[in-house]
Amino acid sequence: MFKFKNQGKLVTVAVAALFLLGVFGVAVSHVGTTYAAGSASSTIGVVNYQLLVTQHPDSAKAQETMNAAIAQAKSDFDAKSATMNDQDKQALYQQLQQGLQQKQQELAGPIYDKVTAAVKSVSEAKGLTIVLVKGATIYGGQDITDGCNESN
């Protein structure tokens, strides 16, 4: 069964990993994973989507809010689990993790929507019909990352 000797550290590490995985998962779900190869085309754009998300003006505040939620979850776990058995501690831990996942989605979702809208706006202005994630593109495409960053 689970031993909770370093509960605070365990919760902090698990929540931080969960947050990072959640951010990556939301980014992938918003962007897709289409791969392109071939010659450069003036109708294909590429964008460093993750860079745009991390540089978005709302990202710093979202991270601060998420850090506060993580600290609160850790505090709640420490306070509530002191007299619990291992099974109840595990249930509480899972409940707090689910709450943090939901909070992360609430905070990151609007940022992804704004970045996607900026990408769409710039791509339409440049007459691009397809925009791919820069890291998934092997060759070609017009990089529009800087233009989208200015739109944020």
Image (cartoon, rainbow, N blue to C red):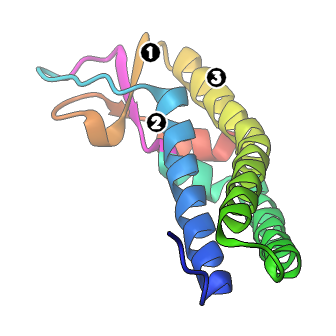
Q: Amino acid at mark 2?
A: Ile
Classify residue 86 by image quadrant: bottom right
Q: Are marks 3 and 1 in contact (CB under 8 Å)?
A: no
The mark that comes first in sequence, 3 or 2, is 3
Task: Find out whether residue 18 is within the magenta segment.
Answer: no
The residue under label 1 is 128
Residue 85: x percent and y percent? 72, 72
Element carrying mark 2: loop
| Range shown magenta | 40-49
The mark that comes first in sequence, 2 or 1, is 1
Residue 67: x percent and y percent? 76, 71
Q: Amino acid at mark 1?
A: Leu
Residue farthest toward the bottom in the current orientation of the protein: 5
- Give the spatial CA distance, label 3 vs label 1: 10 Å
Between 128 and 78, which is closer to the camera in this rendering? 78
Element carrying mark 3: helix
The mark that comes first in sequence, 3 or 1, is 3
Q: Are marks 3 and 2 in contact (CB under 8 Å)?
A: no
Could you tell whether 36 is left or right of 89 in the image? Answer: left
Vertical order, 144 against 104 (above or below): above
The residue under label 3 is 121
Element carrying mark 1: loop
Between 9 and 70, which is closer to the camera in this rendering? 9
Q: Amino acid at mark 3?
A: Ser
Q: Residues within 10 Å of mark 1 (few under 14, many from 20)?
A: some
The residue under label 2 is 144
- Give the spatial CA distance, label 3 vs label 2: 11 Å
Between 88 and 128, which is closer to the camera in this rendering? 88
Residue beneath the point at 59% across and 21% down: 120
